[in-house]
Amino acid sequence: MNPANNMSDEKLIQFYLNGNPTAMATLVELYKDRIYGSIYTTVQDKHVAEEIFHDVFIQIINNMMAGLTPEEGGFLQWAIKLAHALCIERSRKTQTTIVANTGAVEVKDQPLVILPFGPLYHESHGKIKSMIDMLPHDQREVIMLNHYAGLSLKDITDVMKCSLTVALDNLKFGLNNLRKMMIEKEISLS
């Protein structure tokens, strides 16, 4: 096991800024699954997700070199916020709509292995996925960021640039809408 894995994000950032490139490699290794997963669930395209994933770390490195670093304990949230912004930028450039995708992502012959992040993943995840896709954009986005990227509501407010009340309402309404659809379609999570 790499002893650098036991260091705080802040120490790894400092080591990287002091000329230790393995510190960045450690940060990438620690968070790659969650960052890539949040990107993939947004863009639903493996190649686009990989491009954005690499762009996120290029931006992180550029920001660090310019003296901009995340707040203490906020590296993952900072990276996901950058990823979210890049997904939106990419969507605007290609004039496509960002669509939610849920469930596990299986990437064959790739260095990333993405695991399921939330309790919604189970044998009938295809039905749940289609129901989440039917939710309004903000409800869908909060559910994805909370359940699949593992962000807290506070972190979601930073990513979505909304108040805690708005994020909480979108999560509550989204989950209620999912429950209603599940009852209508007689889908059980047990």
Image (spheres, helix red, strand yellow):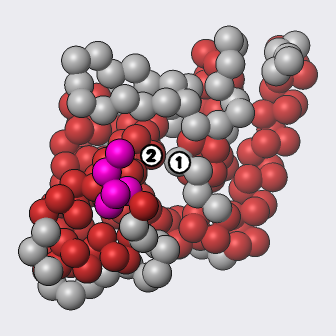
Q: Is residue 4 magenta?
A: yes
The residue pinned by badge 2 equals: 34
Residue placed at 42% from the left, 61% from the top?
Answer: 6
Establish if 11 lies above or below 85: below
> Does the magenta stretch mainly form a helix, a strand or a loop?
helix
Q: In x, y percent, where is residue 64?
A: 21, 78
The three-letter code of the residue at mark 2 reads: Arg
Mark 1 element type: loop
CA gap, disc 1 and disc 2: 6 Å
Judged from the image, the secondary structure of the residue bearing numbered disc 2 is helix
Magenta region: which residues?
A: 1-5
Q: Can see residue 93?
A: no
Residue drawn where x is 65% and y is 25% of the image: 121
Q: Residues within 10 Å of mark 1 (few under 14, many from 20)?
A: many
Q: How many marks?
A: 2
Residue at image location 22% in from the left, 75% down from the top: 15
Where is residue 76? Give x, y as percent. 43, 62
Residue at mark 1: 149
Q: Determine contact: label 1, label 2, CB under 8 Å.
A: yes
136 vs 21, left or right, is right
User: Which quadrant is the N terminus positioned in?
Assistant: top left
Question: Can you tell which quarter of the image residue 153 is in?
Answer: bottom right
Give 161 or 10, whichever is nearer the viewer: 10
Question: Residue 83, located in which quarter of the rendered image?
Answer: bottom left
Give percent across and percent down for residue 47. Answer: 21, 31
Q: Which numbered disc flags the more N-terminal residue, 1 or 2?
A: 2
Name the spot of residue 60 as percent of width and height, x first. Answer: 23, 67
